């Protein structure tokens, strides 16, 4: 089975760091007006920042947050179990527009933890095309709109709901999970322990 996996908020636990960095950036480097769109998933779009400020936030904060973020509890254990069971792990991430060696640093971080995906896809804002081309059986992502798109296109999706997400209606293609134990339970129940 092929499992698509997002990085930030799914493998890397960077949510709280991102929220903190955005508040500090708004207070110290912008106007301190606070959130004007508190339910916006894209952090830099929550504030009244100019396009230049958004770019500056991404340049100054995004790369470091992902590099400093710990692995989500349970991700290492479950991904290793899934790999041993014969499942193919394919990282599909929107990240990679950052300058420098960001991608190499994230790959090194993930693999240093003993997680060895079979493939990586970076800079994929719209992940549907990759999922269809790779014939992904299950996609795990924390972005609500990505999860909805996958489900609408009949790709089974685990919505790894984080602190920035909102309620989505579950259906035969969309299931909400909040931890890697629930991911493991879903995959074993749906697809069995062996290939």
Image: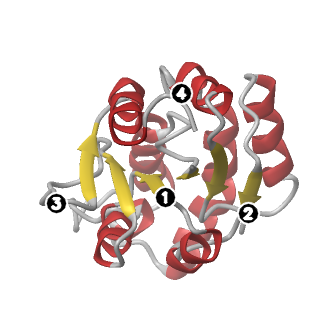
Q: Are marks 1 and 4 in contact (CB under 8 Å)?
A: no
Foreground: disc 1 or disc 2: 1
Q: Tell which circle, 1 or 4, labels the residue nearer the N-terminal end.
A: 4
Mark yes or no: residue 107 visible: yes
Label 1 neighbour load within 10 Å: few <14, some 14-19, many 20+: some
Q: Tell which circle, 1 or 2, labels the residue nearer the N-terminal end.
A: 2
Label 4 neighbour load within 10 Å: few <14, some 14-19, many 20+: many
User: From mark 1 to mark 4, how far is it between C-alphas?
Assistant: 19 Å
Q: Name the residue under label 2.
A: 98
Residue 75's disc is: 4
Residue at 36% across / 57% down in the picture?
A: 157
Q: Tell which circle, 3 or 2, labels the residue nearer the N-terminal end.
A: 2
Q: Name the residue under label 1.
A: 137
Instruction: Give the structural element (helix, strand or loop) at label 1.
Output: loop
Foreground: disc 4 or disc 2: 4
Residue placed most toward the observer, 179 or 46: 179
Q: Tell which circle, 4 or 2, labels the residue nearer the N-terminal end.
A: 4
Relative placement, left or right, of 189 versus 60 is left
Foreground: disc 1 or disc 4: 1
């Amino acid at each position: 089975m092929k499992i698509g996996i997002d990085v930030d908020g799914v493998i890397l636990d960077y949510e709280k760091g991102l929220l903190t960095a955005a508040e500090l950036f708004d207070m110290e480097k912008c106007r301190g007006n606070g959130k004007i769109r508190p339910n916006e998933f894209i952090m830099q779009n929550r504030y009244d920042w100019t396009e230049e400020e958004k770019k500056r936030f991404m340049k100054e904060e995004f790369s470091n947050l992902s590099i400093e973020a710990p692995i989500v509890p349970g991700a290492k254990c479950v991904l290793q179990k899934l790999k041993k069971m014969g499942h193919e792990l394919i990282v599909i991430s929107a990240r990679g527009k950052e300058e420098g060696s960001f991608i190499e640093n994230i790959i090194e971080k993930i693999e240093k933890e003993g997680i060895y995906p079979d493939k990586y896809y970076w800079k994929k804002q719209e992940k549907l095309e990759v999922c269809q081309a790779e014939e992904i059986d299950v996609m795990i992502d924390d972005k609500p709109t990505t999860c909805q798109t996958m489900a609408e296109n009949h790709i089974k999706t685990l919505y790894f709901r984080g602190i920035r997400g909102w309620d989505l209606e579950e259906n035969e293609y969309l299931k909400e999970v909040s931890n890697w134990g629930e991911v493991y339970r879903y995959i074993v129940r749906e697809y069995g322990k062996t290939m």
